Image (cartoon, helix red, strand yellow):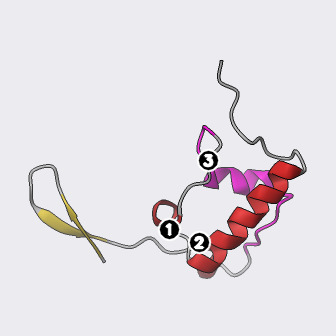
Amino acid sequence: MLRRTSPTGKSFYQKRKTCRFCADQNLQISYKDYSSLRYFITERGKIIPRRISGNCAKHQREINRAIKRARILSIMPFCSIVV
């Protein structure tokens, strides 16, 4: 449980997010699957950190590797196009 404070000053406990890859063993992390990897990057193209996405350390490392491979192979953009 994570202890947080609300804007009014009261503290409460927030339930920890569970890793979706640990919960469902059938999900695979692949650099070829852009549709599943896009949930782990922001609109600006940055990789979402583990504390926000709720992944465990093992799967976060795999996601990072897959995103970086996809970027090098031009499957995913390095950054968004902002003009």
**Residue type pointed to by label 1:** Gly
Identify the residue at image location x=72%, y=73%.
Answer: 27
Kindly identify which residue carries mark 1: 54
Q: Earlier in the sequence, mark 3 or mark 1?
A: 3
**Residue type pointed to by label 3:** Lys
Image spot of residue 54 (x, y percent): 50, 68
What stretch of residues is rendered in magenta?
A: 27-44
Mark seen at residue 20: 2
| In this view, 60 is above or below 38 | below
**Secondary structure of residue under mark 2:** helix
Image spot of residue 6 (x, y percent): 17, 55
Give how far apart the Cα atoms at labels 3 and 1 are: 16 Å
Identify the residue at image location x=55%, y=74%.
Answer: 19
Give how far apart the Cα atoms at labels 2 and 1 are: 8 Å
Q: Are marks 2 and 1 in contact (CB under 8 Å)?
A: yes
Image spot of residue 23 (x, y percent): 59, 79
Q: Mark 2: give few (<14), some (14-19) or many (20+) Cα within 10 Å.
A: some
From the viewer's perspective, tell me whether residue 12 is left or right of residue 24.
left
Task: Using the rendered view, name the quadrant where residue 14 is placed.
Answer: bottom left
| Quadrant for the C terminus in the image | top right
In front: label 2 or label 3: 3
Identify the residue at image location x=77%, y=41%.
Answer: 77
Kindly identify which residue carries mark 3: 46
Please tell me whether residue 71 belongs to the stretch shown in magenta. Answer: no
Identify the residue at image location x=72%, y=57%.
Answer: 36
**Residue type pointed to by label 2:** Arg
Q: Earlier in the sequence, mark 2 or mark 1?
A: 2
- In the current view of this chain or complex, which residue is farthest to the left? 9
